[in-house]
Image (cartoon, rainbow, N blue to C red):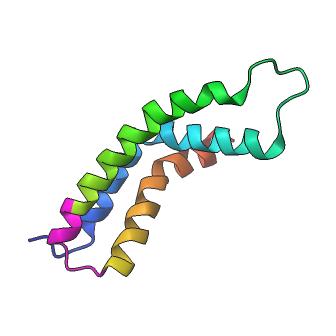
Amino acid sequence: MTRRWQMALGANVLLGIPGVIPIWLLWFLAANWLSGPEPTDNDPMVLWLPIAAIIVGPYAMLWWSVNRSIRRRSVLTPRTYWPLSALATFLPSMALIIYSS
């Protein structure tokens, strides 16, 4: 039985390594949609939506299924478990952002 938070933290950090790509893709879509397209950009952002669905959808299902199975065996409360899982998933992306500048 998973009694500690280390199992959730470790699994989500490992899920965050391939998760760098979907996280970056979601950031890219949000940044371009909010700021508007470049004046010289000929490619519409709608073409990125199928790409995002193909990449983000399976990753989100994998992340959810792994965390749901770990959550069932954990004694952490849902109020503690889900923020810990989400933050741990973002750790590899944050490390890339910090060390790339």
Is-magenta flag for residue 76? yes
Residue 53, above or below 82: above
Answer whether residue 90 is magenta in the image: no
In the image, residue 21 lies at what x, y percent?
A: 49, 36
State the quadrant of the N terminus: bottom left
Image spot of residue 96 (x, y percent): 56, 43
Name of the residue lying farthest toward the right: 39
Q: Position of residue 25 (x, y in %)?
A: 57, 37
Say which quarter of the image contains residue 30: top right
Q: Nearer the viewer, residue 85 or 93?
A: 85
Give the image quarter of residue 75: bottom left
Residue 9 at what x, y percent from top left? 32, 62
The picture quadrant where one finds residue 69 is: bottom left
Point out the residue furthest to the left here.
1
Q: Is residue 26 left or right of residue 66?
A: right
Position above or below: 19 against 67: above
Query: What residue is shown at x 55% (from left), y 51% (from top)?
Result: 94
User: From the viewer's perspective, is 27 left or right of 86?
Assistant: right
Q: Relative to the observer, which residue lies in front, 70 or 101?
A: 70
User: What residue range appears in magenta?
Assistant: 69-77
Viewer-proximal residue, 93 or 81? Answer: 81
Residue at x 75% of width, y 38% of height: 32
